[in-house]
Image (cartoon, grey):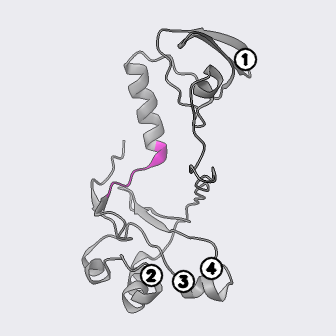
Amino acid sequence: MNAPPGHLRDTCGFVYSVTPYDPEVYKILVVEMLEEAGVNLLVHNFVEHVETKGNTIKHVEISSKFGRHQIQGSIFIDTTGDADIAYLSGAPTLKGRDEDQKTQPMTMKFRMRGVNLSKVKDYMIQNPNNFLSKTPIKDLPNLPLTAVQGFYKEWEQANLLSIEIKCYFLQDLQKMKYLSI
């Protein structure tokens, strides 16, 4: 499998380093690791009901394309992403910020091939005020471009300044270039 290139400098400037990886390779690897550990992996299921006794979950009822099933266990790990099992079991859950319950919006990503990263980097170096102030502009000539936040002038001209845009450029071992916004 194509492994990640290791820790690379975050050229956006939010943190010192990032570890880019191929999400498709990651999906395969994590499933293999879970199977190797003896995990009975259930995907694409919905939690319908959680049966409890006191503070203990007795069983969870799920549904899928294959019907409804009851799962019993001594430990349940809620990986629903929305705390469905916790909520349905009566456990205290929180939604968003304390003051208004607003949540962080979803991140929208897409990938593009054929992005000329050297031209992007050159443009950044020539127009540093058009990018996030934390961007390590002076170090860019010696760094692989891992992330960008900016092109503010272009967003303003398109009347899109109210949208926060982050662009991430990653290169896998096959030298394919990706842009996600």
Judging by the rendered image, the residue that carries numbered circle 1 is: 66
The answer to whether residue 125 is above or below residue 59 is below
Q: Magenta residues?
A: 18-24
Tell me if mark 4 has few (under 14), some (14-19) or many (20+) residues whose alpha carbon lies within 10 angstroms of its own.
few
Q: On the picture, is 96 further left or further right than 23?
A: right
- Image depth: mark 2 or mark 4 in front: 4
Amino acid at the residue labelled 2: Phe
Amino acid carrying label 1: it is Phe
Residue corresponding to mark 3 = 152
Disc number lying in front (1 or 3): 3
State if disc 3 and disc 1 touch (CB < 8 Å). Answer: no
At a point 32% along the width and 63% down the height, the residue shown is 15
Is the residue under label 3 in contact with that under label 4 (CB below 8 Å)?
yes
Q: CA distance from mark 1 to mark 2?
A: 50 Å
* Residue type for callout 3: Tyr
Residue located beneath label 2 in the image:
131
Question: Decide: marks 2, 4 in contact (CB < 8 A)?
Answer: no
Q: Is residue 156 left or right of residue 56?
A: right
> Mark 3 or 2 closer to N-term?
2
Q: Which residue is mark 4?
A: 161
> Residue 121 at what x, y percent from top left?
39, 81
- Secondary structure at badge 4 equals loop
**From the viewer's perspective, is the residue at label 1 or at label 2 nearer?**
2
* Residue found at x 50% / y 18%: 76
Which badge, 4 or 1, comes first in the chain's sequence? 1
